[in-house]
Amino acid sequence: MKILVPVKRVVDYNVKVRVKADGTGVETAGVKMSMNPFDEIAVEEAVRLKEKGIATEIVAVSLGIAACAETIRTALAMGADRGILVETDVDLQPLAVAKLLKALAEREQPGLMILGKQAIDDDMSSTGQMLAALLGWPQGTFASKLVFENGGLTVTREVDGGLETVALSLPAIVTTDLRLNEPRYASLPNIMKARKKPIETLKPADLGVDPAPRLTVLKVVEPAKRKAGAKVGSVAELVQKLRTEAKVI
Amino acid sequence: MNFDLTEEQHLVADTVRSFVERELYPLEQQVERLGDVPREMARDIQRKVIDLGFHAPNIPEEFGGGGLDHLTFALLERELGRTSMALNHWWYRPSNILCAANTEQRERYLLPCVRGERMDALAMTEPDAGSDVRGMKCFARRDGDDWIVNGTKHFISHADWADFVIVFIATGEEARGRKRITCFLVDRGTPGFDIRLGYNSVSHRGYHNCILTFDDCRLPASQILGEEGQGFEVANEWLYATRLTVATMSVGRARRAFDLALNYAAQRKQFGQQIGKFQGVSFKLADLITSIDAADLLTLSAAWRLDRKLPANREIAQAKLFATEMLARVTDEAIQIHGGMGLMDDLPLERFWRDARVERIWDGTSEIQRHIISRELLRPLGA
Ligand SMILES: Cc1cc2nc3c(=O)[nH]c(=O)nc-3n(C[C@H](O)[C@H](O)[C@H](O)COP(=O)(O)OP(=O)(O)OC[C@H]3O[C@@H](n4cnc5c(N)ncnc54)[C@H](O)[C@@H]3O)c2cc1C
Ligand SMILES: Cc1cc2nc3c(=O)[nH]c(=O)nc-3n(C[C@H](O)[C@H](O)[C@H](O)COP(=O)(O)OP(=O)(O)OC[C@H]3O[C@@H](n4cnc5c(N)ncnc54)[C@H](O)[C@@H]3O)c2cc1C
């Protein structure tokens, strides 16, 4: 089975993001960029499936500017076999990403696509779902466990208030939650091997997709500063404040 | 001139950085309080590094090591330098000099080190011979095919963890009274050879220095690394580059201290505004980052010269001198910017400041580095 894993280049999770002075977006100039952490979990899961003999090939895909090749290279160093970069300077929104991935899925015919449940930059959490709809494939989102049996896939999903288990036929879409696995560090031999693995570069036009944005960003602002909390002296005082000030009980 | 790193170099640096931040930072407090690295913790770190194929990254691939070039290795050590020597030691880098081993010694010493089964320490310094290494008193006299050794070494780092020690010993005198120095491989447990803990050092708690004593210790000639009387030639060939380690690690640690100071300056308010808005603080930050970047470039360019087999003696000395003095200043000012809190062991700054102190002393003091630099300049002029 071939697995396609989209990996997004985002501001590193350690960086304290700043809004650009003109309010058009978040400052990325001179900022450390890394692979979206949920995508790292996706790559890790694919590599584990390959180690278990369930997957035969892992293709890492990134969409965006030329520097996204670095993100693909990271996936290759973790164990992916080859990469595809769909290069564009256009600001890609989830629907455009889903359309591009659909075109790639039709071209590559994978048995499974594993995506992050969301990207930590825009927190949209919609690409996986849109892609499943466009392809007409079943989806198991927010996955914390995957089990392959009888030619199908069972996905344990982290939903509000508990775990839900769904059975999917393949090909299918999975999006990863935090607890699916703990991604590995790239090993030195794999870092050295990654250089020799191929990355193919395409343009959106090669896939017949117009990636132009459908949404307009009006303004980006810093979140409101949280007000300082208050310390209470006793449980009784807490209950009283919840009743009289917060009015929640 | 090209300052770009390759994708592999980025990946190596990022991987080491993540490992150090996620696996080693959380252990620092415990090591600091214990003044030791518990055996299980040490083995656990080493096992993880072996699994990553990152063990012995400095040793050529033909011997099973990582085979990194000097520049990539410098990037790796820069990230390792963010944490203390006690912890980063277990991302084990066997002494390069073991590559001088003959085929038989390779099986007994180099290869087990690369596999993580044995560990070395390296001993030159003696109570009466520090900067003046050639003045050593530790002496071996010939007895048939064997050598009988007497003397003392001190300040020997992590010999308490070592299974064997690479020891430099005088084996005679040349006509002009110059000592002949020979390099020996001495196994722990050899009769007449003793390793005990040395002094308590203010720097790098948990990374112990040891005292070695030789009391009529008998070593067969097969324990000689390289040729008899060629100890310094072997050392010059193989240890030449390891002085850069102190410089690269200083740069990594300085960046960590600086980041803390920068963030604090942006947050801490006094007199109704962030202290970073006072020129007294902001100009400090400007000077610190300038000296860190300068040290970084000196260090990486020395490594680059080593990769190109260009003369690098002066450049390595400059990097070691500048980076270690920079680290002292950066850690001191990082504390200053934190005010009283900087001194408290709730923050790692007081530790960085203490750890910084030894960097100007070991692997050749700042004065000896200045001596090397000036000699390189003046000797060609006949002075
Ligand atoms: C914690 C620690 C760990 C160490 N680990 C090891 C190890 O693993 N293996 C090992 O072999 N050694 C090790 N050393 C020894 C280290 O390399 C020496 O401390 C260093 O070379 C200086 O020698 P010294 O301490 O005897 O000082 P000295 O050489 O006595 O120097 C005293 C002072 O005189 C100055 N000085 C000396 N000669 C000159 C000169 N010609 N011109 C100007 N000034 C001069 C020095 O710069 C210094 O300021 C370690 C030291 C420490 C502190
Ligand atoms: C061991 C110890 C014992 C102490 N004992 C006592 C005690 O018994 N009683 C007591 O009352 N206090 C005591 N102190 C507090 C001490 O006086 C303060 O630490 C000191 O005044 C600095 O304040 P701070 O630590 O809050 O640093 P901050 O005032 O937050 O300063 C942080 C940094 O900002 C700089 N800075 C601040 N304002 C400006 C400015 N306008 N322009 C330029 N730079 C600026 C400072 O110089 C410093 O580098 C003690 C402190 C220590 C560490």
Image (tube, coloured by chain):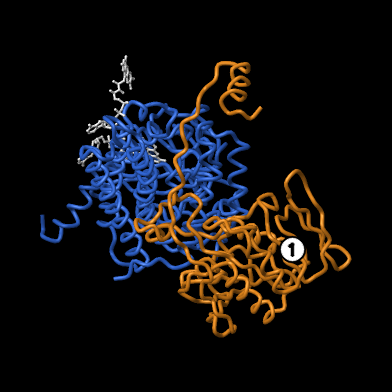
Chain colours: A orange, B blue
Q: Which residue is mark 1?
A: A49
Give x and y (percent) for residue A217: 47, 63
Give x and y (percent) for residue B139: 38, 39
Whether label 1 lies within 8 Å of ligand 1 gets the answer no
In this view of the protein, can residue B165 be seen by the observer?
yes
Closer to the camera, B362 or A207? A207
Give the image quadrant in which the ligand numbered 2 is located. top left
Q: Output the chain of dot 1.
A: A
Q: Residue at x 64, y 79 (%)?
A: A103
Q: Residue furthest right?
A: A150
In the displayed structure, would residue A153 be above or below residue A195?
A: above
In the displayed structure, would residue A90 be above or below residue B29?
A: below
Determine whether, in the image, residue B369 is placed left or right of residue B344: left
Q: Residue at x 83, y 68 (%)?
A: A169
Q: Secondary structure at mark 1?
A: helix
How many neighbours does mark 1 have within 10 angstroms: few (below 14), some (14-19), or many (20 or more)?
some
Closer to the camera, B304 or B219? B304
Q: Looking at the rendering, in which quadrant would you find the N terminus of chain B?
A: bottom left
Closer to the camera, A123 or B108? A123
Closer to the camera, B165 or B341? B341
Residue type at mark 1 is Leu
Q: Residue at x 30, y 53 (%)?
A: B293
Give x and y (percent) for residue B353: 35, 34
Q: Looking at the rendering, in which quadrant would you find the C terminus of chain B?
A: bottom left
Give x and y (percent) for residue B307: 37, 66
In this view of the protein, can residue B213 be seen by the observer?
no
Determine whether, in the image, residue B176 is placed left or right of residue B104: left
Q: How many marks?
A: 1
